[in-house]
Image: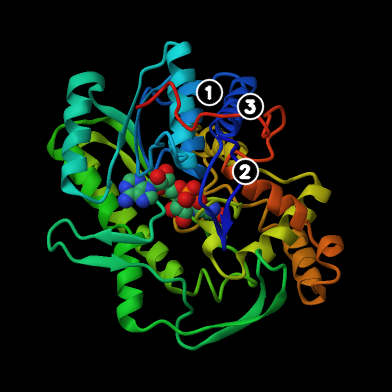
């Protein structure tokens, strides 16, 4: 079939296998070019390993540090008539590259929130890898089935304490207009914390600890975003921000439970960038379109893989990690540089439909968005007949 992007709202419902493989290759090439990470991880579990920050974590561990990786993701395999999801193709490409490089890799495609998935991971570790020295928690999910009660919780992206009206870019119609997002109810806040907070991270570490699969001095890290004034009402001070606060709580609880292995649990604050998760957040596409322009002009723009390289070398595997007063790793310092934020804030009120392409880098945003699904990647022939099936399954 000829595979062209099918964009529906803020999601693209298909993906290009060769484009995704080229993206993975680009990430691997970048990581290899940075050289070996000194004292890096050797046995790594990545929860949410197939796209965005989790994929970048896996590649950095494997190709920057020669680590064995066990990944967990929730992705759609292809059929002969339908493409798989981007994360499926990314993972297939990662496996092909890892195999070629002689690096152990195993992926479990299932619901990371379930007890069955945790048991599967434990069995796989016992069989092949042994104790893990790094556990990355990089899940971004719209819902979670509580493994004990069976109740399904859905996360919402809503402000807290009152409705919020803000400028918004509809990435489909390119209309820039005010959007009002209704305040979340207490129930919605609690549900979002249940899905995106630290409860599942704690369950994972507890399960691994019970199975004696945590190496001496092991580290675990969960990802968050903080942002500044423009995104606070819809992120930091909103339902997702509440869930992320719960990660701080969980980090403390996990840290205490790791005392026996002298382990460490921290939250890592990463920069905003275009991923499948962030494109669903109101306000974010416009904020990102401006941010990309300002940071590119400043020469400080970074993607997932650059962020992860710095997380490993400047935070996780160094004697002098960059920590904030809450003990979180910070890799978002370039985005939050007051000079960068001031420029973004100055552009924000000026943007209209007519000047969208001059005042912002919406073109760059769109390019990044399509690239997530393997489209618009250099060197890929999008007019060629392409099988949605891939050779390397996992
Ligand atoms: P993403 O959508 O690219 O990746 C999400 C991953 O989670 C995928 O591998 C997916 O397969 C997996 N997943 C989802 N549901 C699952 C389930 N039930 N079981 C197993 N796997 C499941 O997201 P991302 O943007 O890379 O976000 C990862 C983390 O980084 C999130 O915690 C997010 O809040 C955080 N973060 C994102 C940004 C950003 O701007 N994108 C910034 C800072 C921090």
Residue at 20% across, 41% down:
118
Q: Name above or below for residue 117 compared with residue 189.
A: above
Mark 1 residue crowding within 10 angstroms, few (<14) / some (14–19) / many (20+) = many
The answer for how far apart the CA atoms under marks 1 and 3 are is: 13 Å
Question: Quarter-wise, where is residue 192 in the image?
Answer: bottom left
Q: Quadrant of the C terminus?
A: top left
Of marks 1 and 3, the one in the foreground: 3
Q: For this view, does 216 lie left or right of residue 289?
A: left
Residue at 67% across, 34% down:
382
| Residue sitting nearer the eye, 143 or 32 | 143
Q: Quadrant of the N terminus?
A: top right
Numbered tag placed on residue 30 in the rendering: 3
Residue at 68% across, 64% down:
287
Numbered tag placed on residue 334 in the rendering: none
Of marks 2 and 3, the one in the foreground: 2
Circle 2 sits on which residue? 4
Q: Which of pointers 1 and 3 lies earlier in the amino acid sequence?
A: 3
Q: Is residue 138 visible?
A: no
Circle 1 sits on which residue? 37
Question: Quarter-wise, where is residue 393 in the image?
Answer: top left
The answer for how far apart the CA atoms under marks 1 and 2 are is: 38 Å
The answer for how far apart the CA atoms under marks 2 and 3 are is: 27 Å
């Amino acid at each position: 079939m000829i595979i062209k992007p099918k964009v529906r709202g803020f999601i693209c419902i298909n993906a290009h296998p060769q484009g995704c493989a080229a993206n993975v290759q680009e990430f691997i090439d970048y990581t290899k070019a940075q050289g070996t990470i000194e004292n890096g991880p050797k046995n790594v579990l990545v929860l949410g390993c197939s796209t965005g920050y989790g994929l970048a974590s896996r590649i950095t561990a494997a190709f920057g540090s020669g680590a064995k990786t066990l990944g967990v993701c929730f992705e759609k395999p292809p059929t002969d008539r339908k493409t798989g999801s981007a994360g499926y193709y990314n993972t297939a490409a990662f496996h092909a590259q890892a195999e070629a490089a002689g690096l152990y890799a195993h992926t479990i495609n299932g619901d990371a929130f379930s007890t069955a998935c945790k048991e599967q991971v434990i069995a796989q570790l016992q069989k092949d890898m042994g104790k893990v020295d790094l556990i990355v928690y990089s899940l971004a999910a719209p819902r979670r089935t509580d493994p004990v009660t069976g109740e399904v919780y859905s996360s919402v992206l809503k402000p807290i304490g009152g409705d919020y009206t803000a400028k918004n870019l509809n990435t489909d119609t390119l209309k820039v207009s005010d959007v009002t997002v209704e305040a979340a109810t207490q129930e919605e806040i609690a549900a979002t914390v249940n899905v995106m907070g630290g409860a599942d991270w704690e369950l994972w570490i507890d399960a691994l600890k019970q199975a004696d699969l945590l190496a001496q001095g092991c580290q675990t890290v969960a990802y968050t975003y903080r942002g500044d004034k423009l995104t606070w009402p819809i992120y930091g001070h909103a339902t997702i921000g509440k869930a992320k606060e719960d990660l701080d709580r969980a980090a403390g609880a996990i840290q205490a439970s790791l005392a026996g292995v002298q382990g460490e649990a921290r939250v890592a604050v990463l920069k905003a960038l275009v991923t499948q998760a962030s494109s669903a957040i109101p306000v974010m596409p416009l904020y990102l379109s401006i941010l990309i322009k300002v940071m590119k002009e400043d020469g400080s723009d970074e993607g997932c893989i650059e962020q992860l390289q710095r997380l490993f070398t400047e935070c996780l595997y160094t004697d002098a990690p960059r920590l904030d007063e809450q003990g979180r790793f910070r890799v978002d310092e370039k985005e939050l540089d007051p000079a960068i934020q001031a420029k973004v804030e100055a552009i924000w009120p000026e943007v209209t439909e007519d000047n969208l392409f001059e005042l912002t880098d919406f073109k760059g945003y769109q390019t990044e968005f399509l690239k997530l699904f393997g489209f618009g990647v250099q060197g890929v022939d999008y007019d060629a007949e392409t099988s949605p099936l891939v050779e390397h399954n996992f």
